[in-house]
Structure formats: C-alpha cells, structure tokens
Amino acid sequence: MANWFESLISSDLAIDLGTATTLIYMKGRGIVSNEPSVVAVQTDAKGERRVLAVGKDAKEMLGRTPVGIEAIRPMRDGVIADFEITEAMLRTFINKVQRRRTLVRPRVIVCVPSGITGVEKRAVRESAESSGAREVFLIEEPMAAAIGSGLPITEPAGNMIVDIGGGTTEIAVISLAGIVFAESLKVGGDRLDAAIIEHLRRKYNLLIGERTAEQIKMRIGTVDPHGPVDQMEVRGRDVGAGVPKTAIVGSDEVCEALSEPVGEILVAVRTALEQTPPELSADIVDKGIVLAGGGAQLRGLDVLIRDDTGLPVLIADDPSSAVVLGAGFTLDNPDLLREVTIR
C-alpha cells in the first residue's frame, strides 16, 4: 500500500542515455524500458521536423527510409548531438513508462560519460528537465557501472571498471565513492561496427549498413584469434557494380577487423593501471578488472585483457544493464546519491 501511494505521488527514474540504447529504471519496479536510441523524423518542405517513430520502430527504419524521412541517432559518443530530437526521444520514453499521471513530477538520474564538458552537462540536464523531470542528478557512467556490478565503491580500496558502451569506453579506478582516475575513450560498439564495414568494403568490395555490421558483430564477433571459426552469409551492395552482392564472412576476419579499435582499449587500460596509486594497484591485483557495457560480451575480450595485463578479469552479471542498475540503486540510497552525483 505504501509503495502504491509513493508511486502515485511520484515515480523517480534513472536513465542510461546511451549512444546505442536508452534504458530506464523506475523506483520500485526495476528496468521498465530498453529501447534503441533512434528517432525517425520527417522533414517537410519548410524544413520543419516531425517525429514519426522512436526506439525499436525507428531502428527498423535505419538505412531503409524514403526521401524526406530520416532515422536519426541523436546521441553520438555518449553525448547529445541533436538536442531537439533527444528531448523528443526522452519525453516519449518517459511517457511510455509512466502510464498514469503522478501528483509530482519525477526526480531523474541521468548517467553521462566521465569526460563530459560543462556545456554537454547543461545540455543533458536541460533535455531531462524539458522532458518532465522535477529535479535532475548526473552520475558518471563508470561510477554507476561499478555500483551496478556490485563493487564495494564506498570502501577504502581500489576498484577498476571498464564500461564498453555504444559510443565510448569508460575506464575508471574508484575508491571511497570517488573516482581516482578516469578516461573516456571514443571507442565503443559504433567504432567496432565501422571497422567491420570498412573491412568488408576493402576486402570484398561489399558495402553494408550499420544494422548488418551490428548483426555480424553479435553473431560471429570475436577478438580471439585462436578460437573456433564461425561463418555468416552477408548481403550488401557491390561498390563497383552497384548491384546486390553476397559474401561468406568468417569470425577470423571479424577478429582482424576489430584488432585496431580493441587495441586502443587495451592501451587505455594499461594507461589507467600506470596512473593508479600503488596501494590501490595492490587491491586491483587481488580483485581484478570488471567489464561492463554491451561491449563486455564480445567473445574473447576478457581473455585478451587478462593476457595483456596479467590481472584477473571478470564480466558483470548483467553487463548491458550495469549502468542503469547502479543509477537505480542510488534512488533508494540518498546518502550514496549525494556522494556520487556530479556537483
């Protein structure tokens, strides 16, 4: 009864506003929305834009829209690239999860990259407020990912998190609910997809779209050169002839294509370890490195980082949802929220 009355007054939300996917956690209910960060927009003769579809429906239109309609991803590299469309997307998602009107507008926690600028913070805050938030708190993504992965971030000990999202890879060392070292690398799922697209164009003269590249990555993507070889039929367009074309692509080729962006992640992880104070380094030797984000599920990545650093590497129980689960946890823990929110 108390929970029902509280939800009637307000339904506080935690939002992982990601480049590829937006997840929403509602206090008392858990994750209530998991939708692609895509908006289909129609532009009229006067240049005015009208939103046609948001989320899953809009993603189905990627690369398939007629003249005058465009499927837009308003988030790039973890930050807002199109303020107006992001606001419309957020409002749609929030209205979907809040089916009944509440007496008080919700408090909203939004997760942002650790390297975000002051201007970008203001854009995120204003976008959330315009979408119906009463109060907006910002939490850095690696901090939220560490909380969602179950790391004891409030203890005086070193915790290392590597959160590989759609637009960025967030690497952080955390102790006493504070970030000791953080780096936001503009390498994520999008860069991996782009590497696959470029590899197929160069090797097979085959042009594919973002959705096809993502499917390749998810089905046969690997960074283990010694693992079993899987194959997949890929359809696209011949760059020279301009006609439809099919190629059989192996996981060993995908591994080769991903070597460069994954190599950048390895360099950033080593840099973070070099910048970590010795006492905290000793803790990381014992606890290891925790991987979160959708990219953590890339086959062989944990083994590659382990071999490169010599440290234990663990994958979070629910890597894709770790950020929003961590932010949602702070909704029920106001003292922790005060400690980890960006001032």
Image: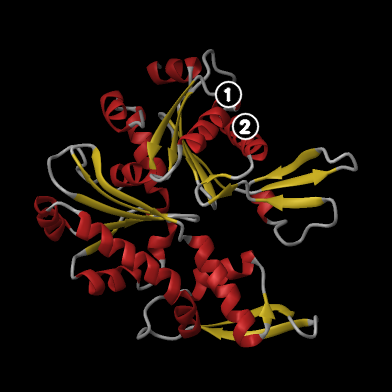
Find the distance from the CA under tag 2 to the CA under tag 1.
7 Å
In the image, residue 267 above or below residue 12? below
> Looking at the picture, how far across and down is residue 340, in whole percent?
30, 33
Q: Quarter of the image holding residue 312?
A: bottom left
Q: Which amino acid does label 2 sit on?
A: Arg
Count of picture labels: 2
SS assignment at label 2: helix
The foreground one among 179 and 56 is 179
Q: Which quarter of the rendered picture does the C terminus lie within?
A: top left
Residue at (76% x, 61% y) in the render: 64
Q: In this view, does 56 lie above or below 112?
A: below
- Give whichever of 258, 27 is nearer the camera: 258
Against 107, residue 82 (above or below) is below
User: Circle 1 sits on which residue?
Assistant: 132
Q: Is mark 1 on a helix, strand or loop?
A: loop
Return the residue at label 2. Answer: 91
